[in-house]
Image (tube, helix red, strand yellow):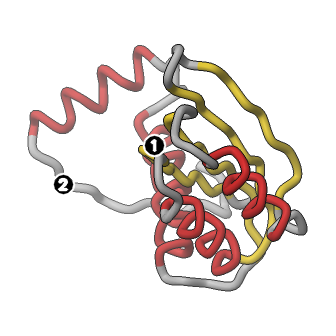
Amino acid sequence: MSDDLDRISLTLPSSMVDRLDGIVDEWEYASRSEAIRDSLRDFFATYEWESGDEQHHHGTIVIVHDHHVSGIADELQTVQHDMADIITSVQHIHLSHDTCMETLVVEGAGGTITELANRLRAIGGVQQVKVVVVDE
């Protein structure tokens, strides 16, 4: 074990160990420890994000909406233009005749990304907004 790693003990129910082992095998992790380290990175990023931090983040916002709702495209674009300083890219996909999905790649302070997501959620016809934030 490397000098910069600390060993800890973890107690889990056998059902969780079985599930962990299955994921380690299926996703081809080198070990349980590597899978748990990967999970903890996501846990730490989620904690920082949900704590309302103002640290610099990268991530995506996925929006699913009914494109037949009158004015929705204009409202989405207005919000995106208002907050263009944190949006680095936009992708628009037609999921069906009625439903579209947009993926916004974002970069900025956690609070500003949250503000963007909340403004998008408030638009009539938006069915779902998902935010995924990652840290470097």
Coordinates of residue 116 in the picture (x, y in percent): 65, 68
- The residue nearer to you, when weighing 70 against 8, is 70
Q: In the picture, residue 117 is in which quadrant?
A: bottom right
**Residue 57 percent across, percent down from the top left:** 73, 66
- As rendered, which of 18 and 54 lies closer to the eye? 54
- Label 2 sits on what residue type? Thr
Q: Residue 133: which quarter of the image?
A: bottom right
Q: Is mark 1 on a helix, strand or loop?
A: helix
119 above or below 39? below
Q: Quadrant of the C terminus?
A: bottom right
Task: Please give left or right for residue 50 compared with residue 56 in the image.
Answer: left
**What kind of residue is marked 1?**
Ser
Tell me the residue that label 1 is attached to.
Answer: 33
Instruction: Examine the rendered structure and indicate whether residue 122 appears above or below residue 35.
Output: below
* Image quadrant in which you'd find residue 120: bottom right
- Tell me which numbered mark, 1 or 2, is placed earlier along the sequence: 2
What residue lies at 48% left-to-right and 48% top-to-bottom?
Answer: 126
Which residue is at the front of the view, 43 or 5?
Answer: 43
Q: Residue 15's mark?
A: none
- Identify the residue at image location x=69%, y=85%: 54
Q: Name the residue under label 2.
A: 11
- How many neighbours does mark 1 have within 10 angstroms: few (below 14), some (14-19), or many (20 or more)? few
* Image: 63 above or below 96: below
Residue 124 placement, left or right of 3: left
Label 2 residue SS: loop
